[in-house]
Every structure is written in C-alpha cells, then in structure tokens.
Image (spheres, rainbow, N blue to C red):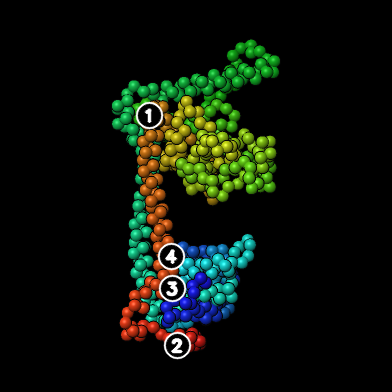
Amino acid sequence: MNQNKNELPKTWIISTLGEICSKPQYGWTTKANPTNGNLKLLRTTDITSGSVDWKTVPYCTEEPDDINKYLLQSGDIVISRAGSVGVSYLLTNVVNAVFASYLIRFKPREPIDKRYVYYFLKSPDYWAAIGASKLGIAVPNVNATKLSKVAIPLAPPKEQKIIVAEIEKQFSRLDEAVAALNRIKANLKRYKASVLKSAVEGKLTEKWRKQSPDVESASKLLKRILTERRRRGEGSELERMKAKGKEPKDDKWKNKYKEPVKPDTFKLSELPEGWVWATPEILALYEENAICAGPFGTIFKARDFRPEGIPIIFLRHVVPGKYLTSKPGFMDATKWEELFKPYSVYGGELLITKLGEPPGVCAMYPKNIGPAMVTPDVIKMSVNDKAVESYFLMHYFNSQVARNFATRLAFGTTRLRVTLPIFRNLPVPLPPMEEQKQIVNEVDQKLSIIDEIESDLVNNLQRADCLRQSILKKAFSGKLISSLYKEPPDNNHLCASKSSIKTELTKEV
C-alpha cells in the first residue's frame, strides 16, 4: 500500500487482511437455479451494485454435504476474485444461503470492527493494491493469498468505531446530496421526453402557427416531392431502356415506377392544421441505398477489422441525438473500397438502431470527419432536405411518439428489432417546411439548456465520488479524526497500545 507507517498516528499499526481475519475461504462450486430451491447461492453479480436483493439471488441446484462450511453469516465479508475483481460486500441481513466459488469469504477477528474493514475495502489504497495484484489475461482475477497480503492501516479498536461513525455520518450527507442530484437528473430526462413529444405533436409551435397562416402546407410540399420523385423514377427507367437500345412504343413503361406506400391514417392521431403523415421511404433521397443497413453474411468478416481504416458504426455508437466514437472499430480500407461503400455514410445522414430497448434510437453522422460504414444492426438514411429537416426527423425518431410506433411494430423474442421494411413505412408527422425549422430552433434551445444542466449534474456526481474517496483516504490515514490527537493526554483511553492489538489479533477465533 502507499501509506507510510511514519505518516500514521503513533497508536496505529500496519497489518494485513490475512492477519486481522480468520483463514479466507473460497465459495462452493455449483450451478444456479433461478426459480426454486431451499438454499440461496450468492454470486459476484449479486453484490456489484453495493446491496443484495435476496429476492433476485438464485437457488443452488444441489446442497453441499458440508453445508455448514459454506453457510453465510452476518458479519461475513465476501470479495469477488474474478470479473468485478475486488468488489466486496459486508453481509448483515442473511437468509439461508451459501456463496459461490468466485467469492472469497473473510471473517474479521475480534476486536476488529467489521465495518472498519469493509470501508477500507472501498478505499483508494485498497483499490491500488488490488490493481497491482490482478492476474490473468481474459478475466483479471485475484486469489485468497494475494488478498490476504493486502496491507491495512489499523487504528485501535475504540478509534475504529469512531472512524466508522464519522464515515457513515459524512456518507449519509453525501447520499442525500447524490439522491437529490439523481432526482433532478430523472426529471430532466422526463422533461426532455416531454419537449420532443410536444415538438412532434405540434404543441410547441401552436402560437407560431397562429402567427404564420400563409406558409405552404405540408400536403403541398409532399405532393411536389412525390411528383419530383416520379419524374426522376420514370427518367431513370427511360434511361435504362435507351441504354439497352430500346425505344418506348407506348406509356406502359411508366407503370414500372412504384409509388411509395403512404401510411394508413385510419388508426393515426389527428395532426395540426397544415401537417400531413409521411414515411421515411417518402422523405429519403430517391437513390439506391438511401435507406439501408450494413451487410449481412459472408462479406462482413471480423478478420477484416483493423486498428485503423474506415470507421465501423456499431449500436454502441448511436445514442439519442449523438454519434459516439468510443470503442472504435475499423474496416480494412481496401475491403471497404471494394465491398462496403454502398453501406457508408459521409456526413449528414441519420443513423437509426435496429435493436435495443427501445429500438429506433437516432443520431446524425457528423459532417467533415470522413466516411464510415454501418453494421447490420444500424440503419442509415440519406434525407431529402427539400422534404424534411434532418434534425426534425432525428428529434422525431427519438421522441416517445416514434418509439411507440417502433416498439409496437418491432419483433423479437429477446430483443426488439426494427426491420428495414418496418422502418421504411414508419408513420412520420410532417409539418410545413417553415414550421419544421421553427421546431428545430425551439427544440435545440431547450435541449441545449438541458444539456448544460446535465453536464453540471454529471460534474457534481463525479465530485461526490471523489469526495467519498477523499473521506476514505482521510479515514485510513488518521486525518478524519485528527482532532483526537490534538486533545490533552487524558483522551488516551481511546487508544490501545500496539502490543495489545497484536495480542488480540493472535487469539484463536
């Protein structure tokens, strides 16, 4: 550990987890049964949140012959040795349960305060020691021997109780502050959802509509877009015929153009005056792969991934309103040039998730950062900016209105999935173009304020975490109760001598 013995109060010693606890014990190796049984099986995943919900803890498929060896008791401390390495939990209210093999049990000896040890297992010095002790490659892990050697600064028994009380007092204040911050965070999330819902239902611009009666209606806009789409479609068909050396003898060739399917408005809500229902198919550019997902099958191979090259857009990169670049993946540039350009974005396209809870989350791919390609779980949409503002469409896809449509139409047993046909025909409320711009401006202003508040909340929550670690750092250096050492000598009854601590520690359990 980083703590120097000379920096500690004179009445403290540096011990180890092995010295202050009885022999550590590994848990029992067995399979879990989530539904029924007589004996609960505590696992690493059950303690990682910092509390244990015994209702969700599974049962053992069988009971060990030497069950008493593994039965948990109040005051036991279990530490994870793999996965969430080093995570610990102090058991208080225990049901009939044993602990799994990836947990190690430590039982602090008397007169050591169990909570004192538990709080040390959350301190920066402990985590620094755990970081230095991690073994393995695929799954970092520690063993009982390594954990037993972790050094712990040990205050006299009575001081341990005072330190624990002070930690819990200060943590209680922090918990109240963090709970208040999280309530604000939840309220902001609800407010953001309310803003988007109000925007795409026309409530946000009710006053603007009354003041702007002469704007072109969305129905006229849509008619013009569909006329231009048909003209381009028929022109493309005529060019294909001439390229084959064929001259049209009548107008039957025009029938090869297929109009996009308009949404069935029978079950849809009534829209504000001047609005009309459309679909992504109608609002996308009329070009090949304007709406598509990444490639399936044999051409999309993990072996073609590279440390650098053309960025690959995975589900994790698409969150509401934001394109993320964390945990990047890259496609071999030569392979991309050969096979994947049709599934690529270049700037300004919308990215929509096909999977998720809920599916249909949308972000815009930024301009001026170069091309990237989507995976099979991400849809890209090239928007016809003469028909719809891209940001309006993005806000709509992220609204609860669109989420309800997507969730109702999506399918999947384990994860809801929006297919391309479902997405192409998803109902989209389309305002007049001028109103779209007004909606985008108002939404952006409100979301900008929300983002600023959320940023402050994140910073304050991070400060709370840092303060929590600072409290623990002070607690296990003697500085949290440093006033004790500034009092007259008659307060020495709080402190035991080093020899008496050593004597207590060597007693049998």
Residues at marks 1 and 3 touching, judged by CB atoms closer than 8 Å:
no
Q: Nearer the viewer's eye, disc 2 or disc 3?
A: 3
Q: Position of residue 297 (x, y in %)?
A: 66, 42
Q: Which residue is mark 1?
A: 435
Provide the residue designation for mark 3. Answer: 477
Disc number placed over residue 500 in the picture, else none: 2
Q: Residue at x 51, y 38 (%)?
A: 366
SS assignment at label 3: loop
How far is mark 2 from mark 4, CA to CA? 30 Å
Q: CA distance from mark 2 to mark 3?
A: 20 Å
| Residue at 40 percent of width and 78 percent of height | 160
Q: Nearer the viewer, mark 1 or mark 3?
A: 3
Instruction: Say which quarter of the image contains residue 12.
Output: bottom left
Give the residue type at disc 2: Ser
> For the residue carrying disc 1, how many other residues have a C-alpha within 10 Å: few (<14), some (14-19), or many (20+)?
many
Residue mark closest to the camera, 3 vs 4: 3
**Sequence order check, earlier mark of 1 and 4:** 1
Which residue does the numbered mark 4 point to in the structure image?
469
x, y (%) of residue 469? 43, 65
